[in-house]
Image (cartoon, coloured by chain):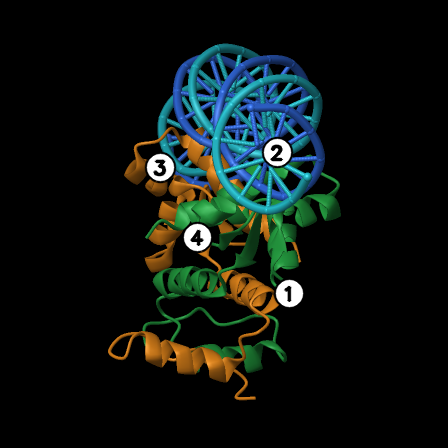
Chain colours: A orange, B green, C cyan, D blue
Amino acid sequence: MKMVKTFEALASEPRLKILAYLSKATLTAGEIAERFDMAKPSLSKHLSILENAGLITGVKKGKFIHYSIVSDHIFNQLDGYLQEVCTVRGPLKRESEKKADATSDGPPTPGKDG
Amino acid sequence: MKMVKTFEALASEPRLKILAYLSKATLTAGEIAERFDMAKPSLSKHLSILENAGLITGVKKGKFIHYSIVSDHIFNQLDGYLQEVCTVRGPLKRESEKKADATSDGPPTPGKDG
DNA sequence: GTAACGATTAGCTAGTTAGCTAAATATATG
DNA sequence: CATATATTTAGCTAACTAGCTAATCGTTAC
């Protein structure tokens, strides 16, 4: 698991913002570049880093490339890492602690119940 | 939420390894430095980055500083980010898709039905 | 083929990061 | 106070990253 690649892709304010934009819609590189007031080549590089890390995917349609987030990958990577490092936390313990932590807010984290 | 700081701290092979070591035990800076065959000042910098991001904490006991992982913080940061970006994924849907993922390689585009 | 448009690659500069060695800080001990 | 140990800070160089402009590639339209 190349976690470093994932974290490197996420360790950038512009890239986090790009992901935030893409979390709600599929956008072309040009649209994103407009929103960010950033030169297109600079943005293109960020997109390639994100795509190379598997966090987004680009689909070419004519002369446009539509980028969209790959939520599954992001989730699997981060969740997998959590289970790797926070070994002591079983799913039930997580649920328990989340309830204790914020009684009003925050949904329970699903797990394998075991 | 300063996610960038967290991700920057995690975007480093040495630092991921340090966290891996600390996930199982509390160690002093010197012990970690020995394991990594890395100059102590270099390691010290990594430790300070991790501590500054809140991922580890150092407790001074005499002339030693015992570093240990702050699993809670790591979990909360990453889990919080997941819920921020992967907004469409409700807990139940996550469970469902994890199961479905094993049988089909093309996960459906997430909708707003959460 | 030529022009226009969308996006990326190439090449450059400025700022940052990673590693080192040497010096400094802090704690125990005599 | 002087010494030894544990860790960090300071200062340096090499390598990397981020951003830009200019040039290139691919597609659509004429």
Q: CA separation, marks 1 and 2?
A: 23 Å
Query: Where is residue B106 drawn, in percent x and y?
Result: 57, 70
Q: Name the amino acid type tagged 2.
A: Pro
Q: Name the amino acid type tagged 1.
A: Lys
Instruction: Please indicate, yes or no, whether residue B114 appears anywhere in the rendered image.
Output: no
Q: Mark 2 points at which residue?
A: B41
Compared across the picture, whether A23 is left or right of A88 comes to left
Q: Nearer the viewer, mark 4 or mark 2?
A: 2
The residue at the point 44 percent across, 55 percent down is A68
Q: Mark 3 points at which residue?
A: A33
Dot 2, crowdedness within 10 Å: few (<14), some or many (≥20)? few
Q: Is mark 1 on a helix, strand or loop?
A: loop
Q: Name the residue under label 1.
A: B24
Q: CA separation, marks 3 and 2?
A: 41 Å
Q: Is residue B89 above or below residue A11?
A: below
Quadrant in which residue B33 is drawn: top right
Q: What element carries label 2?
A: helix
Q: Nearer the viewer, residue A11 or B45?
A: B45
Q: What element carries label 3?
A: helix
Q: Name the amino acid type tagged 4.
A: Gly
Marks 3 & 1, CB-CB < 8 Å contact: no
Q: Which of marks 3 and 4 is in front?
A: 4
Query: Where is residue B104 drawn, in percent x and y?
Result: 61, 76
Q: Mark 4 points at which residue?
A: B54
Q: Which of B58 and A99 is in front in this view?
A: B58
Q: In this view, does B40 lie above or below B80?
A: above
Which quadrant of the rendered structure holds the C terminus of chain B? bottom left
Query: Where is residue A52 drawn, in percent x and y?
Result: 58, 47
Q: CA separation, marks 4 and 1?
A: 18 Å
Q: CA separation, marks 4 and 2?
A: 20 Å
Task: Please state the chain letter of the residue tagged with numbered disc 4 in the rendered image.
Answer: B
